[in-house]
Amino acid sequence: MTKQFREEGKFNYLEVGEGTPIIVLHGLMGGLSNFDGVTEFFPSKGYQILIPELPIYTMPILKTNVKRFAEYVVEFIDHKGFENAILLGNSLGGHIGLLCTKLYPEKVKALVITGSSGLYESAMGESYPKRGDRDYIQRKAENVFYDPKVATKEIVDEVYASVNDRNKLIRTLSIAKSAIRHNMSKDLPNMNTPTCVIWGKQDNVTPPEVAIEFHDLLPDSDLYWIDKCGHAAMMEHPDEFNDLLYAWLQKREF
């Protein structure tokens, strides 16, 4: 299955396969490669995987907020000519997916969130470290996963470079503040889009009780747990994540 990286106007994105579109929304420190398991599994099952690069570090600072990113996702759906799409988001990407679903429900066929922000206010500030030495950054990166070995040197280097880049740091903090302002606890009961919640039982960033609250507040949601798993289930347990998600999509006939 060939992966194609496309650059079209303001959209840079990875596209794999054909079929029902699943648009993947990465987190604040998450690269497109975090979803390699998803891009390898779903195209053979009749889904088209699209991973747009969110303009986290390129948008004007006053527009660097969760609402603008949600609008960007809808612009991407329209750019691709889709009537609607399934959204899959991790961490900040889950929050963007939630806000997109609230503002443009007709564009979202179904929503999948894992380790999502949107309810738990300290999640953003705690998980995205301010400047620090490399050992501090390494400890923070390892805390994202149940198995610290998942935090490879490449991942730690990438986070370290981001938090020591003044432009990226300013935007990271701006997004974190925006995410806290956009707490969605009052919105969720009015959002009827079918939602799949997949969560790591040992998530230190958005703890398990956050998943339970999402499940309780969203009218049409199913909650699935992955054991020995931290904040990025699709990275730490890609096979189990894919199996749970595929079974849910089949059950819901998406």
Image (spheres, rainbow, N blue to C red):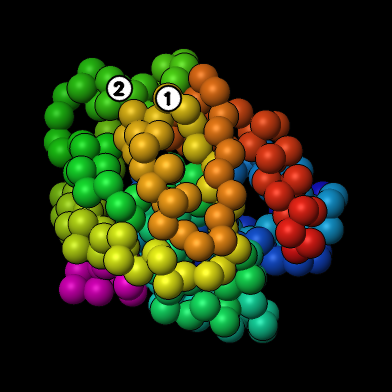
Give the residue at mark 2.
Answer: 138
Kindly tell me whether residue 32 is visible in this rendering. no
Classify residue 208 as left or right of residue 34. Answer: left
Mark 1 lies on residue: 202
Image x and y of residue 82, in percent: 67, 80
Camera-nearest label, 2 or 1: 1
Q: Earlier in the sequence, mark 2 or mark 1?
A: 2
Would you say the residues marked 2 and 1 are in contact, meaning their CB atoms lie under 8 Å apart? no
Could you tell whether 71 is left or right of 250 in the image? left
Residue drawn at x 46%, y 59% as measured from the top left:
218
Q: Residues within 10 Å of mark 2 (few under 14, many from 20)?
A: many
Camera sees residue 22: yes
Label 1 SS = loop
Q: Position of residue 141 (x, y in %)?
A: 34, 27
Which is nearer the eye, 128 or 163? Answer: 128
Q: Could you give the CA–CA distance between mark 2 and mark 1, rounded to whole angstroms?
A: 18 Å
Residue drawn 49% across the image and 45% down it: 114
Query: Where is residue 15 shown, x and y percent of the image?
Result: 68, 60
Q: Amino acid at mark 2?
A: Gln
| Residue at figure coordinates x 53%, y 70% from the top left | 192
* SS category of the residue bearing label 2: helix
Quadrant in which the C terminus appears? bottom right
In magenta, the rendered stretch is: 59-68
User: Where is 251 relative to 7, above or below?
Assistant: above
